[in-house]
Image (cartoon, grey):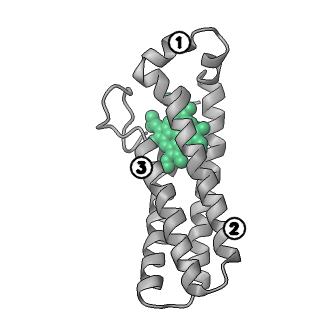
Amino acid sequence: MSFLLILHSWLRWAVIITAIWTIIRAIIGLSGHKAYSSGDNKSSLLFMISMDLQFLIGILLYFIGGWAKNWTDGQIGEVMQNSAQRFFTVEHITMMVIAWIIVHIGRSVVKKAKTDKIKHSKSLVYFLVAFILIMIAIPWPFRTGLGFHPLFRF
Ligand code: HEM
């Protein structure tokens, strides 16, 4: 459990770095009228792979950590009254799953796009929206009422 939590906490940085890398490449590609290159494809692929890993570890944490049980033990009303409980039982998983779906749809839309310009602009829109959702859904240490979630967990 604690090993998975440490992994999940550190992997956030892989998600954030690959997302920013992908978004910057899309902006440069779009503004510089550049061809859509294998480097552009690689950055979004790495973003998707790190999201897939986070998703897998997150689902394990959701069940092992007892968050899933909140739905079935008849306490969901009380859970909703508590901001930390509500955050991990409902908000974090919902926003992250939506972001994960957007990344997957984005990869397929970009692959099918006819021109390099459309590929860059679709990349920018899909991956930027996913990135914003991810940043909102992360339990940053400065967010009050969610318990202690450090930037770097050891
Ligand atoms: C996609 C589905 C995801 C699920 C189901 C999920 C699930 C969870 C759960 C259950 C926890 C609470 C662990 C506990 O304290 O018991 C957690 C914590 C956390 N999640 Fe996720 N998560 C997902 C995606 C993500 C993503 C994409 C990121 C960041 C890019 C992320 C970042 C974090 C962070 C930073 C914590 C706090 C870790 C700590 O306390 O050190 N999660 N997640």
**Image coords of residue 75 (percent x, y):** 57, 9
Judge left or right: residue 83 versus residue 126: left
Considering only vertical position in the picture, is 61 above or below 135?
Answer: above
Q: Is mark 2 on a helix, strand or loop?
A: helix
> Which residue is disc 2 drawn over?
108
At 70% from the left edge and 76% from the top edge, which residue is drawn? 112
- Check if mark 2's residue and mark 3's residue have beta carbons within 8 Å: no
Q: Nearer the viewer, residue 79 or 67?
A: 79
* Label 2 C-beta lies within 8 Å of the nearest ligand 1 atom: no
At 36% from the left edge and 29% from the top edge, which residue is drawn? 148
At 67% from the left edge and 14% from the top edge, which residue is drawn? 72
> Which residue is disc 1 drawn over?
77
C-alpha separation, residue under disc 2 versus residue under disc 3: 23 Å
Q: Which of 117 and 35 is in front in this view?
A: 117
Other residues around mark 2 within 10 Å, as few (<14) / some (14–19) / many (≥20): few
Most distant residue in the top direction: 74
* Label 3 C-beta lies within 8 Å of the nearest ligand 1 atom: no
Other residues around mark 1 within 10 Å, as few (<14) / some (14–19) / many (≥20): few
Marks 3 and 1, the one that precedes in the sequence? 1
Considering only vertical position in the picture, is 148 above or below 36?
Answer: above
Q: Check the picture and name the quadrant holding the N terminus.
A: top right
- Check if mark 2's residue and mark 1's residue have beta carbons within 8 Å: no
> Which residue is disc 3 drawn over?
135
The amino acid beneath tag 2 is Ser
* Label 1 C-beta lies within 8 Å of the nearest ligand 1 atom: no
**Image coords of residue 103 (percent x, y):** 60, 59
**Image coords of residue 90 (percent x, y):** 54, 29
The amino acid beneath tag 1 is Gly
